Image: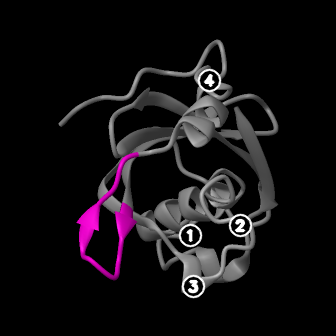
């Protein structure tokens, strides 16, 4: 499981005085960077080999300016060329703020098709198959 901590910035909030719904996806994306380094260690665009097939978010509670939050990321499934990344956002008080899910695919941009995840990366992904113990289930829509 990966952990990424941040303090909510002023720009992240909207007129409703809480974090804008679109920012949750940015938080999830940023939290995935360490995981993406398994596929592309220097995260260079020239070697980019991941695309997103699907993303979703369950908004559980509002997040506000200057709150310190932790984004947890872990793997729930590894397929042939795809894998599912789960996300959960928690505040300092231990309250769950959001649950997210992304389906990512390893992709050959030159030939424009998915490619199998090699055994070395598969083993690395397998080390992150467990999330936080008390995290709420992801609700399918």
Other residues around mark 3 within 10 Å, as few (<14) / some (14–19) / many (≥20): few
Q: Which residues are magenta?
A: 107-116
Q: Position of residue 4 (x, y in %)?
A: 76, 50
Q: Which residue is mark 3?
A: 45
- SS under mark 1: loop
Q: Which residue is mark 4?
A: 131
- SS under mark 4: loop
Mark toward the viewer: 4 or 1: 4
Q: From the viewer's perspective, is 107 left or right of 136?
A: left
Mark toward the viewer: 4 or 3: 3
Rendered image: mark on residue 126:
none
Label 1 or label 3, whichever comes before in sequence order: 1
Q: Residue at x 50, y 43 (%)?
A: 118
Rendered image: mark on residue 17:
1
Q: Residue furthest left?
A: 141
Marks 4/3 in contact by CB < 8 Å: the verdict is no
How far apart are the two marked residues, 4 and 2, measured between alpha carbons?
Answer: 26 Å
How far apart are the two marked residues, 4 and 3, measured between alpha carbons?
Answer: 29 Å
Mark toward the viewer: 2 or 3: 3
Q: Based on the displayed image, in which of its 4 quarters is residue 137 positioned?
A: top left
């Amino acid at each position: 499981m990966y952990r990424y901590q941040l303090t909510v910035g002023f720009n992240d909030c909207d007129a409703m005085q809480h974090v804008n719904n679109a920012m949750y996806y940015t938080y999830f994306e940023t939290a995935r960077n360490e995981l993406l380094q398994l596929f592309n260690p220097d995260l260079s665009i020239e070697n980019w080999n991941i695309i997103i097939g699907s993303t979703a978010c369950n908004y559980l509670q509002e997040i506000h300016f200057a709150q310190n939050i932790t984004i947890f990321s872990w793997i729930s499934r590894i397929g042939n060329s795809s894998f599912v990344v789960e996300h959960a956002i928690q505040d300092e008080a231990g309250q769950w703020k959001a649950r997210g899910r992304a389906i990512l695919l390893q992709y050959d941009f030159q030939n424009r098709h998915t490619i199998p995840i090699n055994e070395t990366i598969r083993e690395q992904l397998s080390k992150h198959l467990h999330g936080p113990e008390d995290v709420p289930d992801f609700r399918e829509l």
